[in-house]
Amino acid sequence: MNRWEYLVWAGILLLCLAGGIALGQMAAPEPVVGVYRFDGAIDFAAAEALTNLLEKARQDPSIAAVVLEIRSPGGLATSSENIFYSMLRLRAQKPIVVVVDGMAASGGYYMAAAANRIYAPASAYIGNIGTRGPRPVDPYISPDELSSGPYKLAGGSRFDQINQLDLIKEGFVNNVIAQRLNSPVNPLKLDKKTVEEGRLYLGSEAVAVGLIDLEGARSDGVLGAAEIAGLRRYRIEPLDSYLGVSMEVQPEYQESITKMAANMGPDTVFMLDDRVALPGIGDGNAIEEHMLQLRNLSPHSGSRASDRLLPAEEGVEPQSGVPQSGASQSDVLPKAKPKVAPLSAKGGQ
């Protein structure tokens, strides 16, 4: 066999090899970029459903990357943390990209901070990093039950509650800083003190300070996820239907906030947009109303008891010496009687 025959056979083998590779690529299923939209407040049910979906995506080898579209004002602190750590587990195996649609505030931004890359429109609201909670109450004793310690019913002093709120905030801030400082696209440019201020930024401002990576929408997020995953050929699928997960229909935006607020306890810690009123604020309770009445009746409340007017009871004359409305002090004080000299001083009378 001469040299030319070797070259011909080598060429044929190369053509067969290239054809086999091409056929294999055509026959093999395309990798999937799964897309899911999270819309509304973050409560226990919403967090559980999303974390289960992300875990299934992590375990499915056909899912090459995930794009999570978010519109959320945040919600419960514990639920926001659960989603954050679930996203980090997914990110350890495959890329996850977040696209903000309108708002990712407080706990909503906590979710976004776990992503490989964050996109948002210029007019979206981003940030508001921090925690909120109802005003702490002092420990109390219930007249209807016994308790084994001074803090058994309240869980701790008001100072304990304030300290716990600050500790949760500290974890939030530190996790955000750790993730955003290591962004390869647009690292954080704010110091910790500024992050702790809890400012709410526009999307364009968030890019400038490094809270997000790029301005963009869902299509940009899909392209970014494919780029990070190194995909040239892929298809886009709704994550829940592709995985066969039946997700509960998410309630309307405002309804989700109302639903979350209705089921929360009085000492719940929130990672919630500061423009959303906390549940129960302003309603008060019987104990607070009673304490307020006692404070108003206290002699140390800033006014003297003698200065307060008591309404006259029906059928009872006002007491002498108590000023009535419109009466001056001279009208109610007894007038001085003229002095009368003793008999011995009247010239022997």
Image: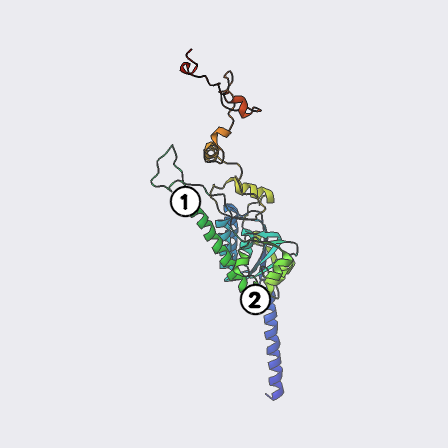
Q: Residue 115 at what x, y percent from top left?
A: 55, 59
Neighbourhood count class around disc 1 (C-alpha, 10 Å): few under 14, some 14–19, many 20 upward: some
Distance (Cα) linking label 1 and label 2: 44 Å
Which kind of residue does numbered mark 2 sit on? Pro
Is 3 above or below relative to 199? Answer: below
Furthest-top residue in this view:
349
- Callout 1: SS: loop
Is 131 above or below relative to 205? Answer: above
Which kind of residue does numbered mark 1 sit on? Ser
Q: Which mark is residue 157?
A: 1
In the picture of the structure, the residue carrying the numbered disc 2 is 184
Furthest-left residue in this view:
148
For the point 63% across and 53% down, which residue is it? 124
Q: Is residue 130 visible?
A: yes
In the picture provided, is 344 more to the left or to the right than 63?
left
Q: Is residue 59 visible?
A: no
Q: Residue 263 at what x, y percent from top left?
A: 50, 40
For the C terminus, the quadrant is: top left
Q: Which mark is residue 179?
A: none
In the depicted view, which residue is nearer to us: 228 or 349? 349
For the point 50% across and 36% down, which residue is it? 284
In the picture provided, is 288 more to the left or to the right than 251?
left
Neighbourhood count class around disc 2 (C-alpha, 10 Å): few under 14, some 14–19, many 20 upward: few
For the point 45% across and 48% down, which residue is it? 162
Which is closer to the viewer, label 1 or label 2? 1
Q: Residue 299 at what x, y percent from top left?
A: 45, 33
